[in-house]
Amino acid sequence: MQVEVYVQNYLNEYSQSESIKIEDIHIPITSQTWENWFNCWLEILQPSISSTANYEIGLRLTNDSEIQELNAQYRQQNKPTDVLSFAALEVDSPIPSEALASMPLYLGDIVISIDTAQQQAQKQGHTLLTELAWLASHGLLHLLGWDHPDEESLERMLKQQVKLLKSVGISIDIE
């Protein structure tokens, strides 16, 4: 199985910004790192998703201003948020087997605000890298049809995120 992650990275624009400096990220998050993480996570989650040899995911790392626009446009909430997911497939929609064999399955797009991620990382007492991985795993689960309309489903989703992060060597405690 192989995942192609198309990363649109807003980080370079931060080098001129007072918010986050590139050097504040001690471990660079390259496109290859993202692909490795998503590959690992999809291996773990594969029993619950359509089996195919290749997947595609769009990942946009952005700022609060842009994510607020998206949040207002698509969720009618005119405020920044940490992560948005735009699933390409309907849950339980059949996918022709010939399509699975011939081309990557496009799962959708994940958009993460680095501004909000940095604030949350500081509040939680962990690194920006950990927070970005946490938010990306959350976004991936949404792409795969997970949701958290109640406390019980949120708890299941958070436990799954802990498992996904642990699989890539990131430890996180949830309260």
Image (tube, rainbow, N blue to C red):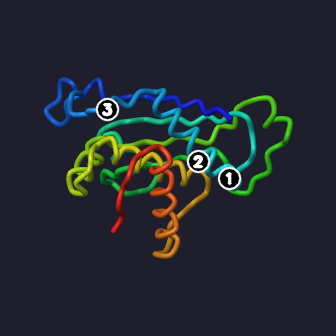
Disc on the earlier residue, 2 or 3: 3
Q: Which residue is mark 3?
A: 27
Q: Which residue is mark 2?
A: 87
Q: Which is in the foreground here, disc 3 or disc 1?
A: 3
Q: Amino acid at mark 2?
A: Ala
Q: Residues within 10 Å of mark 1 (few under 14, many from 20)?
A: few
Q: What's the CA distance linking mark 3 and mark 1?
A: 35 Å
Report x, y in % for residue 46: 68, 49
Q: Nearer the viewer, residue 5 or 29?
A: 29
Report x, y in % for residue 82: 35, 50
Q: What's the CA distance linking mark 2 and mark 3?
A: 29 Å
Report x, y in % for residue 159: 48, 64
Q: Residues within 10 Å of mark 3 (few under 14, many from 20)?
A: few
Q: Residue at x 74, y 48 (%)?
A: 50
Q: Which residue is mark 1?
A: 90
Q: Amino acid at mark 3?
A: Ile
Helix, strand or loop at disc 2?
Answer: strand
Q: Which quadrant of the structure image shows residue 28?
A: top left
